[in-house]
Image (tube, rainbow, N blue to C red):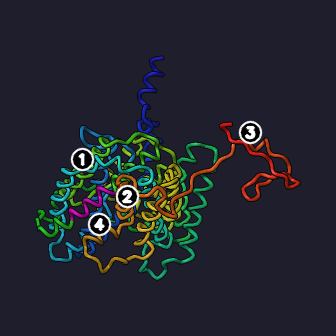
């Protein structure tokens, strides 16, 4: 009896489930493989903009892996005031890449980027509780719209990977790449169909391994660079110089931090909805504080702003593995990769088309989770349909037409060039306008307002006879004679 009670207490929340250590790290590695391409992309882009050589860019990548692992451990394990204790993988936020690139190109270099990240993140740490208090403004009509948009905005990433990962390459989109992505996709489906639970849940990881083996056989995977560089290396504090603090850079980065807070809030709500656990304002605040303190510390080691990775939310949805300790194990793997660059180079050798094939299922499952949330929304006699349509529509604009806001001010582009943040802003504002500021809103405000659901009791249907029909508002029998209809209160 005592053992049963202890088990019930341990697993009172689905995210607190503990799995065998081997399985835990296998699932954790699956999380790392899912987000690896995303976490190394920002340092590659920013390092290239700063004119760094391959070795220096490698240092940036190692730092991002190391800090991302520490941030993931903090977010999942949690300490007082910090960490949502949810299965969320942390890594360099892609939403700040354009701004950091602009700071580098303006002459400030990486030190100005690091300084702006530190100051803006500390401000974000102070205002994090304010974001947490708006939980009541995130009903299913808002969270469902944002979750759906998260999934849809990630699909182009899977498409880019499936085509080879480098749009500038001559063989980008070649049949070989698309075929490899398609094969990986089919392997995911086949393994998911297998009745063995462990195999089914590890379908993404196993499909990536098999896809990589196939790629190596046909000559697409290249492991020749694995031996280049050191095997072990500790991150060096301030390896690129001491941070500098420029007002313009800090203001620009503060806007990025606001976007990051919005996106992380959406990811926390999304993963809470997926695993079926309670997410309140206190938990959101703890998650945002973990984001901000990790972002503030990351420049010391040569990394950038940290946020939750949306693609890993999709992995939680498709595998059904809800344990936060699985993601903690993934954080440990990231730390090890940050200390052992040789292992990082092995993971980096996984061909993008393989990741693309797996990403189709992963990212699509995020959108499917959002659609499932939207199914809970009441659309009768209100403007919820307009809220959903507008949020998803605005969120898709920068995906359907990249560069659509190129002529707008920078602060506007930072917010609305991200489909996730733009959908979140629109959904929140329209929910406030139509569902909270109800003064002046008519009962049936729009043609988009869904009509009330009509229903007929079974006993009423059983009373009908063959040939009965409604004609001109009257019930008639097969011979055209009117059948008397009595009111229920009679």
Q: CA distance from mark 3 to mark 4?
A: 67 Å
Q: Nearer the viewer, mark 1 or mark 2?
A: 2
| Mark 1 neighbour class, 10 Å CA radius: few under 14, some 14 to 19, many 20 or more | some
Q: Residue 129 bears which disc, if any?
A: 1
Instruction: Using residue 202 as the reference point, say whether residue 245 is left or right of it.
Output: left
Compared to residue 374, the image places residue 357 above or below, namely below
User: In the visual, does 468 lie left or right of 38?
Assistant: right
Numbered disc 3: secondary structure:
helix
Numbered badge on residue 440: 2
Answer with mark 2 or mark 4, whichever residue precedes in sequence: 4
Question: For residue 258: magenta?
Answer: yes
- Front tag of 3 and 1: 3
The residue that disc 4 covers is 43
Task: Let me know if residue 259 appears in the view.
Answer: yes
Residue farthest to the top, as pictured: 1
Name the residue that disc number 3 marks. Answer: 459
Magenta extent: 253-262
Give the distance between the C-alpha atoms of the residues marked 2 and 3, in whole angstroms.
41 Å
Precedes in sequence: disc 3 or disc 4 = 4
For discs 3 and 4, the disc positioned in front in the rendered view:
3
Q: Residue 322 vs residue 425: left or right?
A: right
What is the spatial separation of the Cα atoms under label 1 and label 2, in whole angstroms? 32 Å
Local packing at callout 3 (Cα closer than 10 Å; few below 14, some 14-19, many 20+) is: few
Q: Mark 4 packing: few (<14 Cα in 10 Å), some, or many (20+)? A: many
């Amino acid at each position: 009896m005592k053992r049963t009670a202890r088990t019930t207490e341990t697993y009172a929340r689905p995210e607190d489930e503990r799995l065998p250590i081997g399985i835990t790290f296998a699932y954790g590695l699956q999380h790392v493989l899912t987000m690896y391409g995303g976490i190394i992309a920002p340092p590659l882009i920013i390092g290239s903009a700063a004119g760094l050589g391959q070795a220096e860019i490698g240092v940036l990548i190692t730092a991002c892996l190391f800090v991302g692992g520490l941030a993931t451990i903090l977010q999942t394990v949690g300490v007082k005031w910090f960490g949502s204790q949810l299965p969320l993988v942390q890594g360099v936020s892609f939403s700040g890449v354009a701004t950091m690139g602009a700071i580098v190109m303006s002459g400030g270099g990486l030190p100005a980027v690091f300084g702006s990240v530190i100051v803006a993140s500390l401000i974000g740490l102070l205002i994090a509780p304010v974001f947490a208090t708006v939980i009541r403004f995130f009903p299913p009509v808002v969270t469902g719209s944002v979750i759906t948009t998260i999934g849809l905005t990630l699909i182009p990433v899977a498409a880019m990977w499936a085509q080879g990962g480098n749009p500038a390459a001559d063989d980008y989109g070649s049949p070989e790449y698309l075929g490899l992505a398609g094969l990986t996709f089919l392997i995911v489906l086949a393994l998911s169909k297998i009745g063995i639970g462990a195999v089914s849940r590890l379908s993404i990881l196993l499909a990536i391994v098999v896809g990589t083996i196939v790629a190596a056989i046909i000559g697409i995977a290249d492991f020749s660079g694995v031996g280049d560089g050191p095997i072990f290396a500790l991150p060096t504090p301030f390896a690129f110089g001491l941070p500098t603090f420029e007002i313009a850079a800090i203001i620009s980065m503060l806007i990025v931090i606001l976007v990051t807070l919005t996106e992380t809030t959406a990811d926390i709500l999304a993963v809470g909805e997926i695993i079926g656990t309670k997410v309140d304002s206190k938990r959101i605040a703890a998650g945002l504080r973990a984001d901000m303190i990790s972002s503030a510390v990351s420049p010391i080691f040569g990394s950038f702003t940290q946020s939750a990775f949306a693609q890993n939310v999709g992995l939680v949805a498709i595998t059904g593995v809800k344990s936060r300790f699985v993601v903690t194990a993934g954080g440990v793997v990231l730390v090890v990769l940050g200390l052992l660059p040789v292992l990082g180079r092995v993971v980096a050798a996984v061909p993008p088309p393989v990741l693309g094939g797996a990403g189709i299922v992963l990212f699509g499952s995020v959108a499917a989770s959002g659609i499932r949330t939207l199914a809970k929304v009441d659309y009768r006699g209100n403007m919820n349909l307009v809220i959903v349509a507008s949020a998803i529509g605005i969120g898709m604009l920068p995906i359907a037409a990249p560069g659509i806001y190129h002529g707008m001010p920078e602060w506007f582009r930072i917010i609305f060039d991200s489909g996730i943040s733009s959908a979140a802003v629109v959904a929140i504002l329209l929910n406030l306008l139509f569902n909270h500021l109800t003064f002046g809103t008519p009962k049936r405000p729009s043609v988009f307002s869904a009509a009330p659901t009509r229903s007929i009791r079974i006993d009423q249907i059983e009373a009908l006879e063959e040939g009965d029909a409604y004609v001109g508002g009257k019930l008639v029998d097969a011979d055209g004679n009117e059948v008397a209809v009595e009111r229920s209160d009679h």
